[in-house]
Amino acid sequence: MNGTLTGRRVAILAADGVEQVELVEPRKALESEGAHTDLVSLEEGTIQAMNGDIEPADTFTVDRRVREARVGDYDALVVPGGTVNPDNLRSDSDAMSFVRGFVDAGKPLAAICHGPWVLVEADVARGRTVTSYPSLRTDLRNAGAEVVDEEVVTDQGVTTSRNPDDLPAFCERVVREIANAQAS
């Protein structure tokens, strides 16, 4: 462990249907650098992760309900993908307020694969360059984003990636963005 993020708190916003690898790998990268992570979700209890959107994977214990979470308690936010996960999140006003709060506060926000879908609903995609899973790109463009097909993109504090194949670059960038934000 390098300790680059020691003392930092990162919220991981996820619900049932989250793509397991997109939850587990960023969390592991953050914690290996000393960050404390909380799994924030719509309800208390556990969430069901998936492999490839169709195969049930593990369940994960929720640390805090989003309606009780405060942006001020965290230094950054990570939103994993999975098709169902962001669809569940974007229909929850507390979750969308939470996402908007990070952008409004200028704190790092990262979303991978289908995770950038929450940027559309939270109305924070406008004027940013982003990437995502291909099926979301029209929604992102319609929400005012410039969409590119790159492994990882960071624009105005928002980091996005396309799919699980991009996880190494995504995790490295997320750690770097949070480290740089703490140094500012």
Image: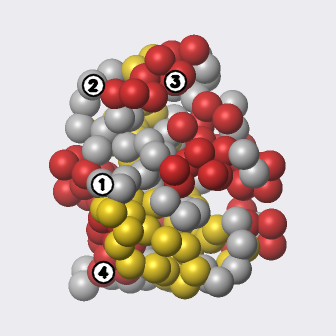
Numbered disc 3: secondary structure = helix
Local SS, label 4: helix
- Label 1: which residue? 52
Q: Earlier in the sequence, mark 1 or mark 3?
A: 1
Left or right of 47: which side holds 183?
left
Separation of marks 1 and 3 at Cα, in angstroms = 22 Å
| 104 over 48 or under it: above or below | above
Residue 32 is marked as 4
How far apart marks 1 and 4 lie (CA) works out to: 25 Å
Relative depth, front residue between 93 and 4: 93
Q: Is residue 66 above or below residue 128?
A: below
Q: What residue is at 49 percent from the left and 59 percent from the top?
A: 17
Residue bearing mark 2: 149
**Residue 113: % across, % down:** 37, 43
Q: CA distance from mark 1 to mark 2?
A: 21 Å
Residue denoted by label 3: 140
| Residue 28, quarter of the rendered image | bottom left
Give how far apart the Cα atoms at labels 3 and 4 are. 32 Å
Look at label 3 and name its amino acid: Leu
Q: Is residue 1 visible?
A: yes
Discs 4, 2 touching: Cβ within 8 Å = no
Residue 133 screen position, x and y as percent: 35, 35
Which badge, 1 or 4, comes first in the chain's sequence?
A: 4
Which one is earlier in the sequence, the residue at label 4 or at label 2?
A: 4
- Whole-angstrom CA distance, mark 4 to mark 2, is 29 Å
- Viewer-side label of 4, 2: 2
Which of the two marks, 1 or 2, is nearer to us in this view?
1
* First in residue order: circle 1 vs circle 2: 1
Question: Three-letter amino acid code at disc 4?
Answer: Ser
